[in-house]
Amino acid sequence: MAEELRYEKLAGELAGMIADGVLACGDRLPSVRRLAEERRLSVSTVVQALRQLEDRGLVEARPQSGYFVRRARAESLALQLRSTPVTAMPVEISQRIARILEDGSRPGVAPLAIAFPANELLPIAALHRLYAGVARRHPHLLEAGSHGRNDLPALIRQLVRRSLAWGGPLAPEEMIVTNACTEALGLCLRAVTRAGDTVAVESPAYYLMLQLLESLGLKALEIPTDPRTGMSVEALELASRYGNIAACLIVSNGSNPLGCVMPEENKRRLAALAAERNIPLIEDDIYGDLYHGNARPWPIKAFDRSGNVMLCASFSKCLSPALRIGFVAAGRYAEAVGMQKTLNSGGTNPMTQMVLAEYLESNAYERHLRKLRSAYRQQVAALSDAVARYFPAGTRIAQPQAGYVLWVELPEGIDTMHCYDRALADGLSYTPGELFSASGMYRNCLRLNAGNPMTPALEDAVRRLGRLFAGELAVEAVL
């Protein structure tokens, strides 16, 4: 077995023991020498495995003492699946979300609300150079009209090549280039639903998806979602028995806000269920490349045998939010989605399409992704550790398997929307939990952005936020 596979196998086994509680929080792992002897591995292989676990935030090295299971990561296992409303709900969150987004981008406010990566993690300088080069070499790209679709063959070719890692390859004719992932999701919804229809969503669900449903006059049916395994296939099967679900909207890899990755068997079952019941499945895979494990998880699209899954993604989280380039592999709905694209926005910026195509063609993107994944893993671990250290006793933390957002569940009695104005007055921001639910659930929860490296200033912001919540809990106890 190759050395790389040996250390990854050992890391995976130790991670499984931590997940199952065999190694509990604070437990000391066997020494490097002991692991090497017992597993018949070299010392360097064992060290590589332990460093990988450290990067993932599962263990920490203590000088002269060895490796120990991190407190924050182990505590996160206590986060449980919640029951959800059994009826579809109208969505009314857009005004509150608009305010959170505006507040979170103010100068001087700690960047914990909006899920944007830190600029220093992104290849901005390389993209600047590519824009200049593309403008010189392809001046004709600014001459075409923009009323119809203008998907560049060069970009489609790169997307199809990348789809080999997603369980593909995907067919070029089903690919449609869009203005970011948001437009891709909206086009898919427009293609398969009408106002008043019911759409199944995860619970908690990404608030932008709920905003899309609100803007289109659609109802949300919240499906229970496990913080480790994602949307409950059993619950969706029950909810869809009477044919009242027009579509299903899901993030199977790095669900926002939980960060969970649905197991492959669940993805296979969900794809089969949706096809059997003729439920178009719209999948957001924007965090698929930002996995925390050893290999990229396949999307549900990889298990689709009927063209029923529409796979949407973009490069906003990996390269730059300002690129605004996304795509959808629309399966048997490609013609309908393409028509919606033409009607709603016409073509997507051809200059940026070519810039992205050339960047993907180089080896720079894969090198960048490796560094970015490592950075996000470390930042999620550092933020988790800070929350565990400073937030009130009884706080529970999700254990993200992809992406860079952190879902935090505070003790009952704390209303994060009620606390929001006081936090903002202190230069703190976050996204209150109730905005991830059409029915207003998760009032004692919040989502934090881990897209920035942990600094003393950011750690102090988490400390002050924890102090605010502890004060709220004390007041509730008195009342």
Image: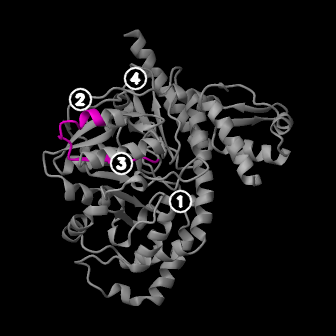
Q: Which residue is mark 4?
A: 414
| Three-letter code, disc 1 | Asn
Q: Which residue is mark 2?
A: 86
Tell me if residue 245 is in the magenta stretch.
yes
Q: Which residue is mark 1?
A: 119
**Residue 262 x/y as whole percent:** 45, 42
Secondary element type, mark 3: helix
Do the residues bearing badges 1 and 4 touch, measured as CB atoms within 8 Å?
no
The quadrant holding residue 321 is bottom left
Q: Which residues are magenta?
A: 237-253
**Residue 90 x/y as whole percent:** 18, 39
Q: CA distance from mark 3 to mark 4?
A: 38 Å
Do the residues bearing badges 3 and 4 touch, measured as CB atoms within 8 Å?
no
The quadrant holding residue 155 is bottom left
Query: In this picture, is 101 found above or below 133?
Result: above
Tell me if residue 17 is in the magenta stretch.
no
Q: Can I make out residue 248 in this image?
A: no
Residue 271: give its label.
3
Question: N-terminal of the two: label 2 or label 4?
Answer: 2
Q: CA distance from mark 1 to mark 3?
A: 36 Å
Query: In this picture, is 123 found above or below 212?
Result: below
Question: N-terminal of the two: label 1 or label 3?
Answer: 1
Do the residues bearing badges 1 and 3 touch, measured as CB atoms within 8 Å?
no
